[in-house]
Image (cartoon, helix red, strand yellow):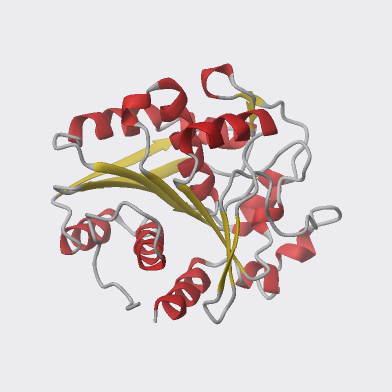
Amino acid sequence: MAVPTTFDQNAVDYTLPHAYSLARASDLAYKDDATIDAQAHDWGFDTVRHHQTRFTPPFPLQDTQAYTMAGDRMIVTAFRGTEPAQLRDWLTDSTTPPWPGPARTGFVHYGFAEALESVYPDVAETIADLRTNGQSVWFTGHSLGGALAMLVAARLDLEDPHLAADGVYTFGQPRTCDRMLAAAYDKGLHGRTHRFVHGNDIVPQLPPEPAFTHVPTLHHIDSAGHVSEKNGLIGGLADRAKGLGAAAFSPDGEGIRDHLMRSYLAALEKGCG
């Protein structure tokens, strides 16, 4: 395998180079609009639309940001993540009620649901508008962005299936929903979702089970680029969420170093090399 320098818009199946390309798209979501536009065009996507909504939930996050880039064969929507310190407060707050899942199926973490709600109409309308040539549709994101990528795919599959995703790739994604929604998600998107966890990344261990869970499929990648696969519905690393506090989210700690997007990119690049 070689490290890709651009997107293969004909990609339909899972490959590590395609995962690396979507990781780069996730990283790009942290950049400013002009940088996103320039890079997307360099990758062969001639149309870019930005999604941003400011709101005031009972959490530290003030906005949701994403972008959609469309080419002749592929449409990619990438959601921006947030700082680990903000996620810590979000994911350990047990005082907020759960949010009903898409099509009233199961429940979703309140903060993620509200963050997605603020941009979902614009994202869905954009994909419907830009999908003029039967292009494949992909969602991606890192950290909080991974949670939103998974949830937008769930909502489209259950409520607007003609826009269902061809693939969902997330990096350092926290748990997002209960087991009922995870099972419904797996039924509709089995084999199309690929969740990457690097090293001892702490964020995928939150919020704690059993209230929240992950959807398949897990790809655990170490710093040398070695990937191990786990395909079970609740598959994942050992749950170490109990007792995790501020110290576990120290910028100098392994759990946060492994969570950084640059750490995922470096590991994936080694895996492709």
Above or below, comparing residue 91 to residue 7 in the picture: above
Q: Which of the two residues, 43 or 182, is positioned nearer the viewer here?
A: 182
Residue at 57% from the left image edge and 52% from the top image edge: 173
- Quarter assignment of residue 108: top right
| Furthest residue toward right | 243
Residue at 46% from the left image edge and 72% from the top image edge: 268
Q: Position of residue 186 (x, y in %)?
A: 55, 37
Q: Which of the two residues, 138 or 45, is positioned nearer the viewer here?
A: 138
Q: Which of the two residues, 231 or 157, is positioned nearer the viewer here?
A: 231
Above or below, comparing residue 127 to residue 235 in the picture: above
Q: Is residue 66 visible?
A: yes
Tell me if 62 is positioned left or right of 23 in this view.
right
- Quarter assignment of residue 273: bottom left
Q: Position of residue 28 (x, y in %)?
A: 35, 60
Tell me if 179 is positioned left or right of 79 in this view.
right
> Which quadrant of the rendered structure holds the N terminus?
bottom left
Q: Is residue 56 visible?
A: no
| Furthest residue toward top | 104
Above or below, comparing residue 149 to residue 249 in the picture: above
